[in-house]
């Protein structure tokens, strides 16, 4: 949230941090360690946010379902996915790991990651 305040209002990081702290003191926002600051009271449940790896995995599942990515053919390389989604290698690896855990793809060491055959896919995707 601090970065958004800095960019939107063209203020220093210190000013943004002080403003968020004041809003928190007034009960208008709350902070969750490691997740950020959120508007509203802390006791109201917030909707889970889709992470970048989850979003990438979901889009790849849609491409598999649409037949764009075919069984026994490789999915796009890490570098291609990194460029396409403008994310770091670790984010792409997490997305591929999600697909692998769900059974949408399988990895052959030193060869690549391939789309699973339809009969081996999960009934409900990522």
Image (cartoon, rainbow, N blue to C red):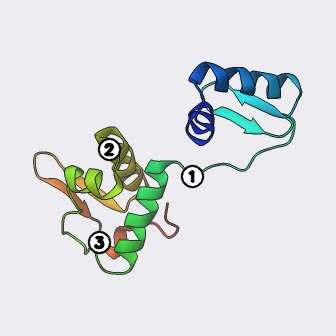
Mark 1 lies on a secondary structure that is loop
Q: Is residue 13 above or below residue 35?
A: above
Which is in the foreground here, disc 2 or disc 1?
1
In the current view of this chain or complex, which residue is farthest to the front? 10
Cβ atoms at labels 1 and 3 below 8 Å apart: no
- N-term-proximal mark, 2 vs 1: 1
In the current view of this chain or complex, which residue is farthest to the bottom? 66
Mark 3 lies on a secondary structure that is loop
Residue underneath mark 2: 93
Frontmost residue, 108 versus 18: 18
Q: CA distance from mark 1 to mark 3?
A: 27 Å
Q: CA distance from mark 2 to mark 1?
A: 16 Å
Query: Which of the 4 image quadrants contains residue 25?
Result: top right
Residue 97 x/y as whole percent: 36, 47
At a point 15% along the width and 45% down the height, the residue shown is: 109
Within-10-Å neighbours for mark 2: few <14, some 14–19, many 20+: some
- In the picture, the disc for residue 50 is 1
Q: CA distance from mark 2 to mark 3?
A: 21 Å
Q: Is residue 17 above or below residue 85?
A: above
Query: Which of the 4 image quadrants contains residue 39?
Result: top right
Frontmost residue, 104 versus 33: 33
Frontmost residue, 16 versus 74: 16
- N-term-proximal mark, 2 vs 3: 2
At a point 16% along the width and 53% down the height, the residue shown is: 112
- N-term-proximal mark, 1 vs 3: 1
Residue 16 x/y as whole percent: 65, 27
Frontmost residue, 22 versus 76: 22
Residue underneath mark 3: 117
């Amino acid at each position: 949230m601090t970065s958004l305040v800095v960019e939107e209002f063209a203020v220093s990081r210190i000013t943004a941090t002080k403003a968020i702290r004041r809003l928190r003191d007034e009960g208008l926002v709350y902070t969750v360690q490691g997740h950020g600051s959120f508007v509203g009271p802390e006791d109201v449940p917030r909707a889970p946010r889709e992470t970048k790896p989850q979003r990438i995995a979901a889009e790849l599942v849609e491409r598999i379902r649409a037949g764009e990515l075919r069984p026994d053919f490789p999915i796009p390389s890490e570098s291609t996915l990194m460029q396409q989604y403008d994310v770091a290698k670790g984010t792409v690896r997490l997305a591929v790991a999600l697909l692998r855990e769900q059974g949408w793809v399988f990895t052959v060491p030193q060869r690549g990651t391939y789309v699973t055959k339809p009969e081996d896919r999960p009934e409900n995707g990522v």
